[in-house]
């Protein structure tokens, strides 16, 4: 049996940890080539001892020295690197078969793009890569032969529900008889909170998701439903869909992860526990299946599966995201950059919860940039939007 070599970008985050859980259950099929983290060196050291990767990458030399000290005197011979160039190297290395792209935010763009350019199997959990550079990303994949496997639970569900003529052969949704992609979302912790009360929401409340265990930034995005907005943009690129091809449904139970509606009236849905190990295992083994250490659904115990339309007045960020992909050009880049700046400010208690959407709206107002034709243009637009967001917040 051929053992696949895997790089895990963002191994100390929630998706990274779930990925390692699956990988360590299948050491006969996979080996870890590289692990990367930002600053969580204590956890990364434990992961290195468990997985024995060839390389570990952290953000800077300070954390690299800490990691070297933690591994000193252990049987682990992992080589410690730091910086973006090292992230790119372990993503594009000729020794790597597949890359789990799980770095949160714009920081994951360059190593993920490098993996695509190198023709890797890319298990995409970093939605910002497609939000910021969807056209460039998909063009690079087509040129290199990279296989993009969506790992977000919603996109992975759609992937599983679509026919091979779309996900393998690249045919259009219309030719496959698809009438709608139905993207589900839980609605987060404030689905029924009166809008007037949202300004008093604390970071702790925003990070307490009712169904999923996630990092702080993604949890806040879920609370504002920006997460679903970013997924809407990502789905357009992943499945060659127009905005009109996608509907969003609020599904509080997080059991139906998404659905595909066909022109004959059929709807195909993917159901499962709210556990990221299921889509991770699916992407690792596709087109085969492997055990994910996830309990099967007990349908007799399911009390309710309910659905409702999203309230765009309640979730302004969702509306902003959908309008950004409709507008195109650099609007999705600006949307993502402004959101990252605003969420960070909220988590540091510098702005109220409702100011996240206000900041994004201000940055997008009058934004009239061209469609980026290379990654450098994407980075420039990202920097301009971040500065505009910081300027607005400073006022």
Image (cartoon, helix red, strand yellow):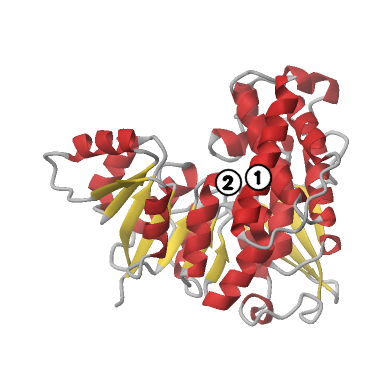
Q: Secondary structure at mark 1?
A: helix
Q: Is residue 235 left or right of residue 52?
A: right
Q: Position of residue 301 (x, y in %)?
A: 62, 47
The residue identified by callout 2 is 106
The x and y percentages for residue 105 are: 57, 44
Q: Secondary structure at mark 2?
A: helix
Point 64% across, 41% down: residue: 383
Instruction: Judge left or right: residue 95 versus residue 188.
Output: left
- Label 2, label 1: how far apart the Cα atoms are: 9 Å
**Viewer-closest of 387 and 82:** 387
Q: Which sits earlier in the primary sequence, circle 2 or circle 1?
A: 2
Q: Is residue 269 visible?
A: no
Q: Position of residue 179 (x, y in %)?
A: 84, 70
Figure check: 284 above or below 365: below
Residue 23's tag is none
The quarter of the picture where the N terminus appears is bottom left
Taking the spot 77% from the left edge, 23% from the top edge, the residue there is 198
Q: In this figure, which residue is indicated by the disc labeled 1?
A: 382
Q: Give the crowd class for mark 1: few <14, some 14-19, many >=20 residues within 10 Å.
A: many
Say whether marks 2 and 1 touch (CB < 8 Å). Answer: yes
Vertical comparison of 289 with 377: above or below: below
**Disc number lying in front (2 or 1):** 1
**307 lies left or right of 120:** right
378 and 69: which one is in front? 378
- Residue 124 visible, this orientation: yes
From the top left corner, tell me how far across and down residue 246 is, in percent. 80, 60
């Amino acid at each position: 049996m051929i053992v696949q070599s895997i790089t895990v970008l963002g191994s100390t985050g929630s998706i990274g940890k779930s990925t390692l859980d699956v990988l360590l259950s299948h050491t006969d099929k996979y080996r870890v080539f590289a692990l990367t983290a930002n600053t969580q060196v204590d956890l990364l050291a434990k992961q290195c001892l468990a997985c024995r990767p060839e390389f570990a990458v952290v953000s800077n030399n300070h954390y690299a020295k800490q990691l070297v000290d933690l591994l000193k005197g252990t049987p682990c011979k992992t080589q410690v690197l730091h910086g973006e160039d090292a992230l790119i190297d372990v993503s594009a290395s000729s020794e790597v078969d597949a890359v789990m792209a799980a770095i949160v935010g714009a920081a994951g763009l360059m190593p993920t793009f490098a993996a695509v350019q190198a023709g890797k199997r890319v298990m995409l959990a970093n939605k910002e890569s497609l939000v910021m550079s969807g056209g460039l990303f998909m063009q690079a994949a087509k040129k290199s032969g990279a296989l993009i496997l969506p790992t977000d639970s919603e996109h992975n569900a759609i992937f599983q529900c679509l026919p091979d003529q779309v996900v393998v052969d690249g045919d259009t949704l219309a030719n496959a008889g698809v009438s709608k992609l139905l993207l589900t979302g839980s609605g987060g912790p404030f689905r029924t909170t009166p809008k007037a009360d949202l300004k008093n929401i604390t970071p702790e409340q925003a990070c307490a998701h009712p169904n999923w265990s996630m990092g702080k930034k993604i949890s806040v995005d879920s609370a504002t439903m920006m997460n679903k907005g970013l997924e809407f943009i990502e789905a357009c690129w992943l499945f060659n869909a127009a905005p009109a091809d996608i509907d969003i449904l609020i599904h509080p139970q997080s059991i139906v992860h998404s659905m595909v509606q066909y022109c004959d009236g059929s709807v195909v849905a993917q159901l499962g526990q709210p556990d990221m190990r299921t889509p991770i295992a699916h992407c690792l083994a596709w087109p085969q299946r492997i055990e994910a250490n996830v309990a099967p659904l007990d349908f007799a115990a399911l009390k309710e599966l309910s659905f409702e339309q999203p309230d765009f007045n309640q979730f302004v960020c969702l509306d902003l995201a959908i309008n950004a992909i409709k507008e195109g050009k650099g609007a999705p880049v600006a949307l993502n950059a402004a959101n990252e700046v605003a969420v960070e400010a909220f988590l540091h208690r510098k702005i109220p919860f409702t100011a996240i959407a206000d900041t994004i709206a201000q940055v997008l107002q009058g934004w009239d940039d061209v469609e980026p034709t290379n990654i450098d243009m994407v980075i420039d637009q990202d920097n301009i939007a971040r500065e505009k967001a910081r300027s607005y917040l400073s006022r």
